Image (cartoon, rainbow, N blue to C red):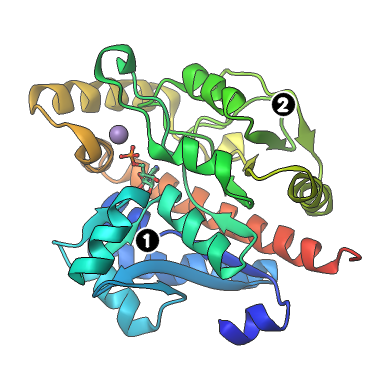
Amino acid sequence: MADALASGAPVVALESTLLAHGLPRPDNRAAADEVEDAVRAGGAVPATIAVLDGVPHVGLTPAQVDRVCADPDLAKLGIRDLPVAAALRLSGATTVSSTALLAERAGIRLFATGGLGGVHRQSVDTFDESADLTALSRTSLAVVCAGVKSILDVPATLERLESLSVTVIGYRTRTFPGFYVADSGSPLDWSVEDAEQAAAVLAARRALAPGAVVVANPLPVDQQLDADLHDRVIADALAAADAAGVRGKDVTPFVLDHLHRASEGATLEVNVRLVLRNAELAGRIAAALAALPG
Ligand code: PSU
Ligand code: MN
């Protein structure tokens, strides 16, 4: 990893929360390898990020990936949790917010994930808005995602991204993707047609001011989750979280797990597929960025 970065080779950061807390064991272990391979297929070097025994790692060995995927007690670390993990020598998976920060500090300019955290429904009462959003307002990299999951308030999340001056572009689309489905129903102002254009937007953003570029990459319609199944399991999962009194950072993992079981694996399959597509696109954008003059 150090060699790749020092030589200016294209590198793509990958988060570990989606492995440790977003996908069920043991399937998450194979997915971890597939995501890294997808980055390579795009033309870049993958760097999965996690904190092990208090030390942030940018790029993991296979044994370290084993640990992230197998340990049921691994913490979920946002930015505010990093100092505690460092000081107390704890281990944890990194979310979008903390992965973006650690990647930026390592000199990485591309980041691939499944979905961003966002504004939760009922946030007016609960104040539950992911730290991912404010983190992206301060972090100068591009994050390739399939939007945010429909368990969130998608229009409110897009409003917050606007308030925070985060650049949002659709990849070959003018509607924000809906994670499991291609179209969330919310329009986007801008789109790019290829990896080169996305790289050019990122370069321009970096020249302008700190802050991220969200590259929203939808699943093709023929690969998305069945719409009826989607609406049914989402409503179900939110009701279950409410009934179980789940709060704070446990909400997203709880709901994902519920969806995977309620859909008999259909959401899991779609989730892995979209992460692979995002990793491959991020690899291509990283390669295009490395090829830009200057
Ligand atoms: N979206 C997914 N799967 C995930 C997450 C988001 O489809 O696993 C994870 C990401 O790591 C994201 C985090 O940064 O959930 C957001 O958690 P919270 O809502 O607690 O901020
Ligand atoms: Mn939250």
Could you tell me the amino acid type at mark 2?
Answer: Arg
* Residue 52, quarter of the rendered image: bottom left
Could you tell me the amino acid type at mark 1?
Answer: Ser
Q: Measure the alpha-carbon separation of dots 1 and 2.
A: 29 Å
Q: Tell me the number on the disc at residue 174.
A: 2
Query: Can residue 145 be seen here?
Result: no
At x 64%, y 30%, the residue is 165
At x 74%, y 23%, the residue is 189
> In the image shown, does 94 or 104 lie closer to the viewer?
104
At x 34%, y 55%, the residue is 17
Taking the view exactly as shown, the residue that stands out farthest to the right is 293
Q: Secondary structure at mark 2?
A: loop
Q: Tell me the number on the disc at residue 16.
A: 1
Mark positioned earlier in the residue sequence (1 or 2): 1
> In the image shown, does 68 or 173 lie closer to the viewer?
68
The x, y position of residue 14, in whole percent, is 48, 62
The x, y position of residue 97, in whole percent, is 44, 48
Query: Can residue 28 be seen here?
Result: yes
Ligand 1 location (quadrant): top left
| Quarter the N terminus occupies | bottom right
Question: Which mark is nearer the camera, 1 or 2?
Answer: 1
The x, y position of residue 25, in whole percent, is 22, 62
